[in-house]
Image (spheres, rainbow, N blue to C red):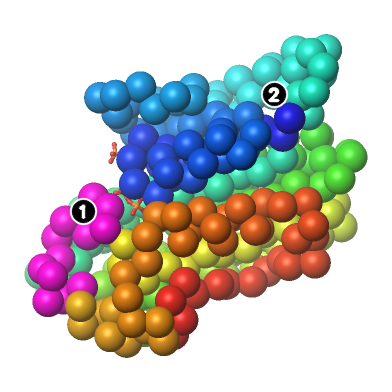
Amino acid sequence: MKLIAVTGAGAGLGRHIAQRALEQGYEVAGFSRSKPGKDPGFPLTVGDVTDHAAVAAFFASLRKKGASCQKESGKEGLWGIVNAAGIASMNLLPATPPATMADVLKVNLLGVMHCCAEGAKLLLRDSGRKGGRVVNFSSIAAPLALAGESVYAASKAGVETFTRCLARELAPFNITANVVAPGPIATGILRGLSQEQIDAVVQRQVVRRMAEPEDVWNLVRFLLDERSSMISGEIIHLGGV
Ligand SMILES: NC(=O)c1ccc[n+]([C@@H]2O[C@H](COP(=O)([O-])OP(=O)(O)OC[C@H]3O[C@@H](n4cnc5c(N)ncnc54)[C@H](OP(=O)(O)O)[C@@H]3O)[C@@H](O)[C@H]2O)c1
């Protein structure tokens, strides 16, 4: 059984991905800033991706798990990291407080770097057999250069370039790294946007409807698949830009 680490697994897309991965026969370890009220049905470590020590401790706990797993039949150690933890700030730049700018960059960019760095160490250790998978999250806000999302879009553009570089670093070990970049999906992250603003973004997509969490899982599932070993360093825009 392959182990998938999912950040942001407490809510929204991360939670949906973790639950669907579990249903599809993966072992799942979630990491998120707060615990959801209801038991998500998979182990969830509470921690902040901006806290490097917390991220390192999370992956160290999976390492220990991996070692004991090897004795249990059917468990294979860490196969994939899905970095879904993220925050948004929807505001014109002059109205964005500097602390918000720093938070968005820290969570969306530095947080992904922490998780990829610590997660990659474990993937490299466990990848001897068939490789591994990294899936990061961007947004169509980056290629569409949306007004009111400059800080958020810049953080996601950073994730895209970061992931393309990481893909090259990990390719010799048969580990792929890709980016899923959706348009608006009804989760908590959209709370600062009006329906009119959401509709205006959706109208700029090739597919003019809001995606569902299941559309995201369909893409993540494909990228996690062992047969997707030729796909790396790619940014896939859900809905099309
Ligand atoms: N939904 C969309 O429209 C959309 C579109 C394009 C891209 N995306 C991207 O998709 C990813 C998932 O978004 P979502 O829609 O699932 O958002 P969401 O519903 O707000 O969920 C985000 C999750 O990440 C967690 N999180 C936030 N900051 C964290 C931190 N510092 N450390 C650990 N966990 C943290 C949140 O925990 P708390 O609940 O405790 O805050 C929450 O569980 C994000 O990267 C987002 O930018 C989303």
Image quadrant containing the C terminus? bottom left
Q: Residue at x 39, y 27 (%)?
A: 40
Residue 121 drawn at (x, y percent): 72, 38
Q: Residues within 10 Å of mark 2 (few under 14, many from 20)?
A: many
Q: Is residue 44 above or below residue 79?
A: above
**Residue extent of the magenta highlight:** 186-198
Contact check, label 2 and label 1, Cβ < 8 Å: no
Helix, strand or loop for disc 1: helix
Q: Residue at x 40, y 82 (%)?
A: 207
Residue 209 drawn at (x, y percent): 32, 75
Magenta-colored stretch includes residue 154: no
Helix, strand or loop for disc 2: helix
Asked if residue 104 shows in the view, the reply is: yes
- Of residues 110 and 198, the one nearer the viewer is 198
Residue 26, by quadrant, is top right
Q: Residue at x 16, y 56 (%)?
A: 191
The answer to whether 206 appears left or right of 187 in the picture is right
The amino acid on which the numbered mark 2 sits, given as a three-letter code, is Arg
The image shows a total of numbered marks equal to 2
Distance between the Cα atoms at labels 2 and 1? 35 Å
Q: Which residue is mark 1?
A: 99
First reached walking from the N terminus: tag 2 or tag 1: 2
Residue 91 drawn at (x, y percent): 15, 69
Residue 64 drawn at (x, y percent): 69, 17
